[in-house]
Image (cartoon, helix red, strand yellow):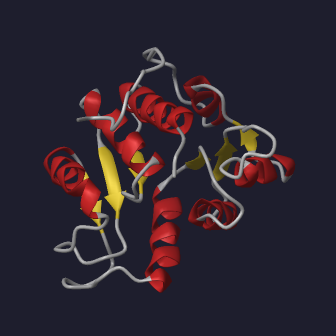
Amino acid sequence: RASHFGSRFALTLGSGLAANGLVTVSGLAAGIDAAAHWGALEVDGPTVAVIATGLDIHYPRSNIALQERIIQQGCVVTESPLGTQPSAFLFPPRNRIISGLCRGVAVVEAGLRSGSLITARMALEQNREVFAVPGRAGDPRSQGCNQLLRQGAAQLETIQDVLEAINWPYLKKIDYISAEGNPGQ
């Protein structure tokens, strides 16, 4: 249920971070996760997808082509054995792995009951940076981000916000990418 803005922002974030030598790590979910992965891939950057299923299970099915591309250019990680089907109880452990692999976690859009908020909480427990994109008041897709900002998350408006927070050199500017429809296709 990502908005057009959220998908474009995630695509640009993935591209910009990859262009500056950082690895994009996400959960291969439809929407924001997929856009961030596609962004990294579009600039030939590395990306890591952490999945909750077995490596032989494609979930969501809409991301089969993306998962295959990540296997060629990045890495797909899971702690689930082959044949493991998607189940709600598998996603919080997946989110723990995502936050554990990262120096910082960026939340682009999130409702109040979003798995992204679980990842952000785990990142804080692991002493990682947490970034949130401010959203429109009253938009259910922004309530989680706005809550994170009230709780002290770093405001994320540009790639430079991330790079400065982790003391990473700014190597290459990526202009805002306009993605109509599904990024990467």
Could you tell whether 3 is left or right of 174 in the image?
right
- Image quarter of residue 137: top right
Residue at left offset 49%, top offset 85%? 89
Could you tell whether 99 is left or right of 174 in the image?
right
Is residue 132 depicted above or below 93 in this figure? above
Q: Could you tell me how many numbered marks the image carries? A: 0
Residue in the foreground of this view, choosing between 170 and 55: 55
Residue 74 screen position, x and y as percent: 23, 48
Is residue 134 depicted above or below 150 in this figure? above
Residue at left offset 18%, top offset 50%? 65
Residue in the foreground of this view, choosing between 70 and 32: 32
- Image quarter of residue 155: top right
Residue at left offset 51%, top offset 63%? 100
Could you tell whether 50 is left or right of 121 in the image?
left
One can see residue 23 in this view: no
Residue 185 screen position, x and y as percent: 23, 35
Residue 109 screen position, x and y as percent: 61, 47
Residue 84 screen position, x and y as percent: 27, 85
Residue at left offset 41%, top offset 59%? 27
One can see residue 121 in this view: yes
Is residue 173 depicted above or below 152 in this figure? above
Could you tell whether 108 is left or right of 56 in the image?
right
